[in-house]
Image (cartoon, rainbow, N blue to C red):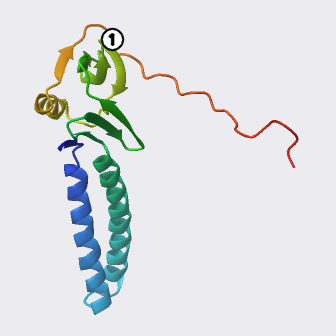
Amino acid sequence: MTVVRAGVRPWADRLAWSLVVVLTGSALVIAGVVDGTIAIVTRVLVIAAFLLMVAALAIVTVRLRTSLRSDGTAVVVRDPFGASVVPFHEHLAFGRWLDPESRRPVIWMTDHGGPIVRVHPRLDPVCVELFAGRVALAVVDRDGAPPAPPDPPPVTRDRPAGPRY
């Protein structure tokens, strides 16, 4: 199985440092080493570090969900809140457009040159190219503006229309 995940380094560092501050500050307050104004400041720092720790944990969790995977029969493009499974076939490739505003590549899985699934921007383009090489898919540079994401499907109601009670 080949897997490429989004980077978590800065948030993993923040998570580790906030954990150290929470544990050290809590131990100092509980043991009674600090008192008075310093104890109040330490408690405030522990609360702030705890909030940072919660935020960092949430961000790390979401970023670890962003990935490209392949088991040899299909490519799974995962973003934080969904996934698309694309079976291998002859005209499957990665298309790379250059976004004129951000000057960063926008990568889509393409079928016969047409975009089908966007690769999440948090995935490093170099890692996506390495992934493509490992699963034997081409990375094709495309001219023009990158395709826009498709419009979401309209929301429909499954229950019959009628009076609400």
The quarter holding residue 48 reads bottom left
Question: Residue at left 35%, top 40%?
Answer: 79
Above or below 76: residue 94: above
The quarter holding residue 32 reads bottom left
Q: Give amino acid for label 1.
A: Ala
Q: Quadrant of the N terminus?
A: top left
Residue 131 percent coordinates (x, y): 15, 33
**Residue pointed to by mark 1:** 145
Q: Between residues 127 and 72, which one lies in front from this camera angle?
A: 72
Residue 5 percent coordinates (x, y): 23, 44
Q: Between residues 49 and 35, which one lies in front from this camera angle?
A: 49
Above or below 153: residue 58: below
Q: Between residues 81 and 112, which one lies in front from this camera angle?
A: 112
Residue 64 percent coordinates (x, y): 28, 49
Left or right: 66 as drawn, with respect to 163:
left
Left or right: 138 as drawn, with respect to 159:
left
Above or below 60: residue 5: above
Question: Residue at left 28%, top 37%?
Answer: 122
Q: Between residues 74 and 9, which one lies in front from this camera angle?
A: 74
Report helix, strand or loop for mark 1: loop
Question: Residue at left 33%, top 82%?
Answer: 39
The quarter holding residue 4 reads top left
